[in-house]
Image (cartoon, grey):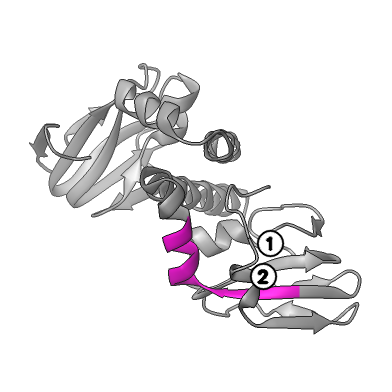
Amino acid sequence: MKTPLRVDAERMAYPRQIIDKGKQIIAAGTATDQAYFLISGRARACNPLIAEGELQSGDFLSFLSFLALDAYDADVIAASQAEVLILPRGLVEQCWQDEDQTSWVFACSLAVDVVKRKLALDTVAA
Amino acid sequence: MTKGFPSIQMIDGEVLFRQGTAAEYFYLIERGKVLLLDQSGQVVLRSYDADQVFGLPEVLAGALWPHTAVVSGKTEIRVFPAKLLFEQIDKMPAAHQDFMNEMAKLAL
C-alpha cells in the first residue's frame, strides 16, 4: 500500500542501512518507534498480520503495524539487496500532520481497526 | 474536531447500534468500553476502549453495521455524523484520500 507521505531530500539525511538479500530488516517485536522506508530493492514480511505483498522501493515497510501497534508483528526480510531509510516516529507523524492533521488521526484509527478485525477473524478461525 | 458534537452517556448493556442499521455515525469512546457482538449476541467479536475511534470503515463505505454494539460499564461516547468524515476527507490532499479509502477497504 502506497502511503501519502513523501520522503524528500531532507528526510533522506536520516540513517540508512544496506541489507543483503535474505537478511532481516525488521525483527518481529521491534518497537514501532521507527519507520523503515525502502529506498531501493525489495522486501517481504513473513506471516504478517496484514498481508501487504512484496514491498518495493518507495514503500514503508509494515506500515500498518507502524500505525496501529507498539511493536512490529512480523519479521521483514530483504528479497533483494535493499537500502533502507530509518525515520523516527515523531518525524513521520510531524511530516504527515504538516500535510494534513486530520488524516493522521484517521489513518491511525483505521489501522487499529484493521488490526482488531484481523485479530478477531484469526481468533474465530482458530 | 470534537467540539460541538454531542457526547452521550450510556450504561452497561445499552445498545449503541444494531446489526443491519445504516452506519450514519462514527464514534470516539471517551470513557468505558464498546463490545461488538456476533449474531447470537453471546460472543464478543472485538472491543473498543477509551480514546479509540471506531466505525470509520462502515461510514466511509456507506454500509450497514455488520454487528450489534453494546457498551460495557458506564461509557461516554462522542458521536460524529458521517457528513463530518466526508467533509474532512474532501479537504485532504488526494494521496491522503486514496490512502484512507484503501485502509477502509482493508478493514471491511
Q: Amino acid at mark 1?
A: Pro
* Residue A76 percent coordinates (x, y): 74, 71
Residue B73, disc: none
Q: Nearer the viewer, residue B49 or A93?
A: A93
Q: Secondary structure at mark 1?
A: loop
| Residue topped by disc 2 | A74
Residue B53 quadrant: top left
CB contact under 8 Å: marks 1 and 2 = yes
Q: Say if the magenta span includes residue A42.
A: no
Q: Does mark 2 fall on the same chain as mark 1? A: yes
Q: Amino acid at mark 2?
A: Ala
Q: Is residue B82 left or right of residue A49?
A: left
Q: Is residue A91 visible?
A: yes
Q: CA distance from mark 1 to mark 2?
A: 5 Å
A37 shown above or below B62 = below
Callout 2: 10 Å neighbours few (<14), some, many (20+)? many
Q: Residue at x 57, y 53 (%)?
A: A5
Q: Secondary structure at mark 2?
A: loop
| Residue topped by disc 1 | A48
Q: Which residues are magenta?
A: A84-95
Q: Nearer the viewer, residue A31 or B68?
A: A31
